[in-house]
Image (spheres, rainbow, N blue to C red):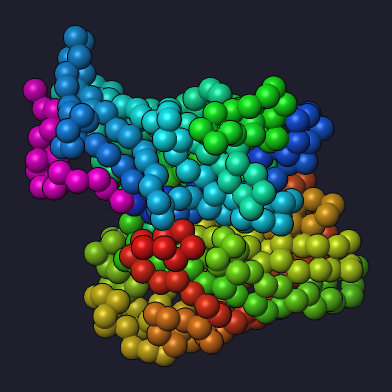
């Protein structure tokens, strides 16, 4: 009978942890009142470590019903972590594994003797950190996916849903293959003591059911660019255009993150694909009522390309190289989140893989920005950004650590 062990041996995987880049999204309710708290959807990305067969302790086995399965652990270590920027907190948040409570699970055949598609269950225990908070939760967050391979990498520019919902929910969603979804929410997070144990009975925040119920997926980029950015966006509100200065520091999990995929990492022929996987640029708008944040959409990937389109590797890209992105934006305002009706074309010249000084500007027609119910509230008529300090490498380490 075919077992996962044979799959691993055919892939010739070395007995070592797998390090992968994770794209995640969760909806957070702040405060101890789940029903009245402030709600925000936060995009997160970062480096995770997956322990699985053939590492000792994570062997494959066949159960009494003939289903082959293997154990897995999602782990963090110094320098690893998944992070994003919170508009509500005006601060970086970082998710780590809890060393006292391992995040373990199973990959199990759906049909005996047939490896894929398979079911993947992972019970997550985490620590959430900001500059002022350290939180943990009492119960496991069960996550579930149907996967096509181990590790379950998604193709570049893959959508996490079947379809494109607008708004942060909660409502029913249909998540795509190879996308883990939290299935036991809401989950309360409490202040943690020095031993990472939850304290008290009053939570500081919740992970909530939503359009992004603690979802995550793995990608396998050739290069990751985490970049501080500054610039401006032009927004037309009630017939008047306002220029809003915006900025974000990548060391605070703001700014932008751009993933580059060589042809060996995708199946779209020659050329280097690009994806803006995370964006958080903050500014102030009088017309929109105060502090605003431009972010990359989670359900609608922002895809593009670097170079001329005929390169077989990143090494063949001639610099300064053309970088273009069909950017899908959300705009968070004090009155709620607005959603761009469609992508806008951002383009510019990337000086090299150390992008400081490179510029991106809006090169397409403007687009409406709408509330979740489809009501047009504004128009995005311009955008221009300059890249500043950056961390560039094959893995996205926390705050540039190695």
The correct choice, above or below, for 317 with respect to 5 in the image is: below
The correct choice, above or below, for 226 with respect to 29 in the image is: below
Q: Quadrant of the N terminus?
A: top left
Q: Is residue 18 visible?
A: yes
Residue 311: x %, y % from top left: 28, 79
Is 189 on the left-hand or right-hand side of 2? Answer: right
Is 356 on the left-hand or right-hand side of 266? Answer: right
Residue 249: x %, y % from top left: 60, 69
Farthest residue, direction top:
64
Q: Nearer the viewer, residue 234 or 89?
A: 89
> Looking at the image, how many numbered discs can be counted on the residues?
0
The correct choice, above or below, for 300 with respect to 384 in the image is: above
Q: Nearer the viewer, residue 389 or 179?
A: 389
Q: Residue at x 10, y 47 (%)?
A: 12
Residue 45: x %, y % from top left: 49, 54
Q: Quadrant of residue 100?
A: top left
Q: Residue at x 83, y 72 (%)?
A: 236
Is 322 on the left-hand or right-hand side of 133? Answer: left
Q: Which residues are magenta?
A: 1-19
Q: Residue at x 38, y 47 (%)?
A: 77
Q: Residue at x 49, y 63 (%)?
A: 399
Decide whether residue 31 is among the magenta residues: no
Q: Is residue 181 visible?
A: no
Q: Quadrant of the C terminus?
A: bottom left
Q: Quadrant of residue 234?
A: bottom right
Is 202 on the left-hand or right-hand side of 149? Answer: right
Q: Nearer the viewer, residue 175 or 132?
A: 132
Residue 123: x %, y % from top left: 43, 27
């Amino acid at each position: 009978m075919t077992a996962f062990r044979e799959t691993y041996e055919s892939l010739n995987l070395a007995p070592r942890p797998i390090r992968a880049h994770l794209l995640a999204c969760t909806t957070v309710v702040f405060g101890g009142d789940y029903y009245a708290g402030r709600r925000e959807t936060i995009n997160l990305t970062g480096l995770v470590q997956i322990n699985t067969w053939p590492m000792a302790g994570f062997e494959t086995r066949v159960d009494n019903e003939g289903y082959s399965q293997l154990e897995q652990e999602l782990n963090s270590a110094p320098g690893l972590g998944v992070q994003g920027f919170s508009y509500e907190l005006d601060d970086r948040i970082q998710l780590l594994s809890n060393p006292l409570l391992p995040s373990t699970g199973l990959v199990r055949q759906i049909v005996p003797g047939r490896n894929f598609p398979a079911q993947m269950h992972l019970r997550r225990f985490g620590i959430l950190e900001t500059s002022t908070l350290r939180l943990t939760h009492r119960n496991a967050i069960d996550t579930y996916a149907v996967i096509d391979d181990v590790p379950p990498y998604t193709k570049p520019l893959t959508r996490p849903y079947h379809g494109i919902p607008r708004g942060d929910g909660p409502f029913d969603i249909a998540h795509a293959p190879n996308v883990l979804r939290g299935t036991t929410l809401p989950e309360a997070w409490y202040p943690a003591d020095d031993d990472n144990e939850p304290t008290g009975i009053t939570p500081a925040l919740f992970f909530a059911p939503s359009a992004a119920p603690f979802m995550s997926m793995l990608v396998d980029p050739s290069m990751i660019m985490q970049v501080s950015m500054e610039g401006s966006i032009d927004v037309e509100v009630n017939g008047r255009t306002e220029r809003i200065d915006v900025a974000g520091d990548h060391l605070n999990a703001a700014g932008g993150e751009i993933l580059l995929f060589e042809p060996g990492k995708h199946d779209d022929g020659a050329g280097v694909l690009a994806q803006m996987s995370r964006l958080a640029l903050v500014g102030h708008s009088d017309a929109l009522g105060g502090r605003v944040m431009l972010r990359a959409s989670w359900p609608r990937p922002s895809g593009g390309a670097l170079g001329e389109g005929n390169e077989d590797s990143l090494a063949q890209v001639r610099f300064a190289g053309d970088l273009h992105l069909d950017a899908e934006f959300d705009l968070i305002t004090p009155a709620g989140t607005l959603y761009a009706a469609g992508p806008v074309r951002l383009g510019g010249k990337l000086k090299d893989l150390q992008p400081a000084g490179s510029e991106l500007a809006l090169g397409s027609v403007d687009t409406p920005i709408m509330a979740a119910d489809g009501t047009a509230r504004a128009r995005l008529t311009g955008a221009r950004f300059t890249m500043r300090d950056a961390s560039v490498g094959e893995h996205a380490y926390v705050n540039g650590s190695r």
